[in-house]
Image (spheres, grey):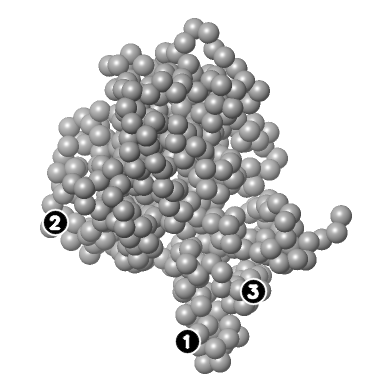
Amino acid sequence: MAVNTTEGGLSAPTRHNIDWKENKFYDKNSINDELTRVFEACHGCRRCVSLCQAFPTLFDLIDESENFDLESVDKKDYVKVVDECYMCDLCYQTKCPYVPPHEWAIDFPHLMLRAKAEKFKNNEKKKNKIIKLRNYLLSSTDILFSSLSKPVIANIVNFIFSKKIIRIFLENVLKIHRDADLPRMSPVNLKTRLKKLNLKIIGQKDIVKTGKTKGKVKLFSTCYCSNSTPEIAEDLIKVFIHNNIQTEIFDQENCCGMPKLELGDLKSVEYLKNKNIPNLAKAVKDGYDIVSPVPSCVLMFKQELPLLFPNDKDVKLVQKNIFDPFEYLNLRDEEGLFNENFKESKGKIAYQTACHQRVQNFGPKTKSILSKIPESEITMIERCSGHDGTYAIKLESFENSIKIRRPVVSRIKKDSYKIFTSDCPMAAKHISNDLDNNEIEVKLHPISILKSAYGI
């Protein structure tokens, strides 16, 4: 087969496995050579300048250099570009004309991952201990959330973090921006809520399978939706049961590993993979599909882990059987199994598509399902929120996160919407902080709009 050499060719993008266990993967000179090659191509293209701060940082380095060329940029400054990339994957999936199978084979996000991994592996001992502690805490979401969301402790934590003096202290000591929106801890986690509602293991007696779905789901509820916003997972379960999908939750789950991936801490990614995959694979073997409400978690199991561990059969099994909730509902709808018995209309909805959902390449299924609600009008906003889990919390990147979210906020404010939502609850919260919530109702996840429209 001929190699694609046409800019913007019609061939589907392909991803190569990530050889992170090879010594060459961490070779600084090899990484700098590849960064130079890719940055030269980016300099001549510049299509990605509006996506995130990584590209403006790169282009500023070039434009402010002595010769207005990459050659006169100090390679020590390459890390400034690497640090701004939070691997949303949009450049690869929506903008770059040189991705494989093009002969240039540019994969900007995974090159940034390689540079992050080298930095994490070789600079850990040199790193400021405070920054190292902060990064560890912010990326250890399962430990952090489960510890702080216990009864009594959660209320104390929420009270303490609401105090300005504490936030100033966190900024000065841990470099967490004083205005960053920290997740609130729920004193009643998802498991406790479901026990009270008797919804943990409940469903319809007659399970209806389709060609692509089993009609029987286990919910990977995520650190965030288990311990900070359990109402989202609860709404998802109610909507799925209302659609005749038997829905249960896992007795045990750990962080998907995305926060560690974004640090370049690949050994921790492997550790979390080894904790999660056996449970998820067992569920698939027992006849379940897996659904998760947070796009980053789905993407981790669908894309990143299979590329990091291409020979792990259980990883591949999970990859083929994990779904975004609206992807799953749409697959059921294709065979006439989606419940359209709505009780309420929802009017004009501003809907921000989460980057990590967009790059899963299954199309605008959230909009498709929400559009079934009578007398509802969905406006899809395809711009990044700038949140990325920790990017909008860290002192050094908070202001950039605000800059990145502005086009989304501006688009919402231009019209009179009744509801705003996003597939990512953290992105929804980040964007809504700059909206007048007296003028627009904020739903942290579109599944809650469905639940409300059903009147359940």
Residue type of the residue flagged with mark 1:
Glu
Relative depth, front residue between 52 and 8: 8
Q: Which residue is mark 1?
A: 64
How far separated are the C-alphas under marks 3 and 2? 45 Å
The tag earlier along the polypeptide, 3 or 1, is 3
Q: Disc 1 vs disc 2: Cβ atoms closer than 8 Å? A: no
Q: Which residue is mark 2?
A: 164
Element type where label 2 sits in the image: helix
How far separated are the C-alphas under marks 3 and 1? 18 Å
Q: Is 150 on the left-hand or right-hand side of 392?
A: left
The tag earlier along the polypeptide, 3 or 2, is 3
Relative depth, front residue between 187 and 174: 187
Considering every residue shown, the one lying at the far bottom of the view is: 66
Which residue appears at 22% of the width and 59% of the height?
178
Residue type of the residue flagged with mark 2:
Lys
Quadrant housing residue 360: top right
Relative depth, front residue between 398 and 405: 405
Image position, residue 263 (x, y; %) = 47, 56
Relative to residue 254, is residue 426 depicted above or below?
A: below
Which one is closest to the eye, mark 3 or mark 2?
3
Considering every residue shown, the one lying at the far right of the view is: 1
How far separated are the C-alphas under marks 1 and 2? 38 Å
Badge 3: how crowded within 10 Å, few (<14), some, or many (20+)?
some
Element type where label 1 sits in the image: loop
Do we see residue 269 in this rendering?
Answer: no
Quadrant housing residue 190: top left
Q: Is 176 on the left-hand or right-hand side of 321?
A: left
Which one is closest to the eye, mark 1 or mark 2?
1
Badge 2: how crowded within 10 Å, few (<14), some, or many (20+)?
few
Which residue appears at 18% of the width and 61% of the height?
168
